[in-house]
Amino acid sequence: MFATQFCNVLSPLMNTIDSAILILEYNLQYASAKVCPQYCISDGGFYMTCPSSGSQQLQPPCNCCFAPSGCQIFGSDGTLYCTGT
């Protein structure tokens, strides 16, 4: 699609130029992304622990998707809710 639009823009210009060299470089880069749900853990009884903080109970992020890798979110009764990836 982009190449077609680009050529359509250049065609009139190329008709007015006797000779031209056109060099195009297309550098495609890949990225990884994570799709996170748009909900928050509403119960205030949740806490999080992370390997870097040991057994210290931390305030969890909005949901498991936002938890740092390796961190675990627990319910108030100590039941594992999820692990961050």
Image: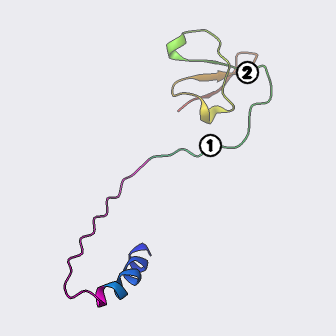
Name the secondary structure under disc 1: loop
For the residues bearing labels 1 and 2, Cβ distance under 8 angstroms: no
Q: Is 47 covered by the magenta stretch?
A: no
Q: Residue at x 73, y 39 (%)?
A: 39
The crowd level at tag 1 (other Cα within 10 Å; few <14, some 14-19, many 20+) is: few
In the displayed orientation, state which residue is furthest to the right.
43
In x, y percent, where is residue 81? 67, 27
Horizontal side of residue 65 vs 31, given as left or right = right
Please tell me whether the stretch drawn in magenta is mainly helix, strand or loop.
loop
- The Cα–Cα distance between marks 1 and 2, rounded to whole angstroms, is 19 Å
The quarter holding residue 19 reads bottom left
Q: Which residue corresponds to mark 1?
A: 36
Depicted 69 relative to depicted 47: above or below: below
Q: Residue at x 25, y 86 (%)?
A: 17
Mark 1 or mark 2, earlier in chain: 1
Depicted 25 relative to depicted 14: above or below: above
Depicted 57 relative to depicted 24: above or below: above
In the displayed orientation, state which residue is furthest to the bottom.
15
In x, y percent, where is residue 73? 65, 23
Looking at the rendered structure, the number of numbered marks drawn on it comes to 2
Name the secondary structure under disc 2: loop
The quarter holding residue 38 reads top right
Q: Residue at x 42, y 73 (%)?
A: 2
The amino acid type, in three-letter code, at marker 1 is Cys
In x, y percent, where is residue 74? 68, 21
Q: Residue at x 74, y 34 (%)?
A: 40
Q: Which residue corresponds to mark 2?
A: 46
In x, y percent, where is residue 1? 44, 76
The amino acid type, in three-letter code, at marker 2 is Phe
Q: In this picture, which residue range is highlighted in magenta?
A: 14-31
